[in-house]
Image (cartoon, rainbow, N blue to C red):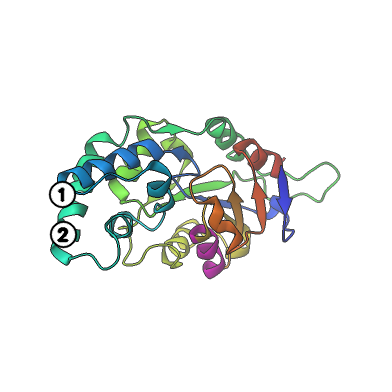
Amino acid sequence: MIRHLRPFDPHRIRLLIFDLDGTLVDSRLDLIHSVNATLRHIGRPELDGDTIASYVGDGAPMLIQRVLGEKPDEALLRQALDCFLAYYRQHKLDHTTVYEGIPEVLATLSAPNRSPTNAPPTNAAPRLMSVLSNKPVHPSRDIVQALGLGHFFVSVYGGNSFPTKKPDPQGAQTILHETGVAPDQALIIGDSSIDIQTGRNAGLWTCGVTYGFATHTLAQVPPDVLIDNPHDLAELFR
């Protein structure tokens, strides 16, 4: 189902910026295993998967800080973060998969942007697509490539690609500058309020997906459009 909260013309969109975890790929289990391996390593009890998944979205340092609780000791935080990153580096593709329908939808979206029947002609150039994640850039790129999605994107950026992370607009603004696309001709797609706030901060149109990790946060910062599955995104641009 597609729910429009603020109407816009999809045929004017020339750039799509995707979140990674909870939007393109289901990495939930590998993140849960990596967090619990870290907790075991530092002598802490494991957490349930739903709790860990609710902590995802602001990057690895914030994930581990939330896992450890309020104001963790700096040395412990660094030890736990290093452990998490080392474990995740080795196990990031154990169970991570592309959401059903994503490859087909990306292929459809990368086709030339043509006007609907009887509409005035538009620029028929293919839409450009990029990934902007708060996950560190190297595992982000490794996952995108390993799961066969790399050729769809003009760039893949992670949480350490810039001095700031989402929802700061720097990453989105960099992608706009590199592609030469105006903010009102770009759409950001993600499963959390962080992605939607990023879009707002950069002047983009926003799309929330309800099948990801942090969909409960979308009520806090409502997107311009909500979709329930990847095929809805293709339908939006049909």
- Location of residue 233 (image quadrant): top right
Q: For the residue marked with disc 2, what is the amino acid?
A: Leu
Toward the viewer: 224 or 26? 26
Q: Indicate whether residue 224 is drawn in magenta.
A: no
- Which quadrant holds the C terminus? top right
Q: Above or below — where is 16 with respect to 163?
A: above
Label 1: how many Cα within 10 Å (few below 14, some 14–19, many 20+): few
Magenta-colored span: 194-202
Q: Position of residue 121 (x, y in %)?
A: 77, 49
- Which quadrant holds the N terminus? top right
In the rendered structure, are the residues bearing label 2 and label 1 in contact, judged by CB atoms less than 8 Å apart? yes
- Location of residue 203 (image quadrant): bottom right
Q: Position of residue 96 (x, y in %)?
A: 38, 33
For the point 27% across and 42% down, the residue is 36
- Location of residue 101 (image quadrant): top right
Q: Please name the residue that numbered disc 1 is placed on.
A: 42
For the point 31% across and 50% down, the residue is 137
Q: Please name the residue that numbered disc 2 is placed on.
A: 76
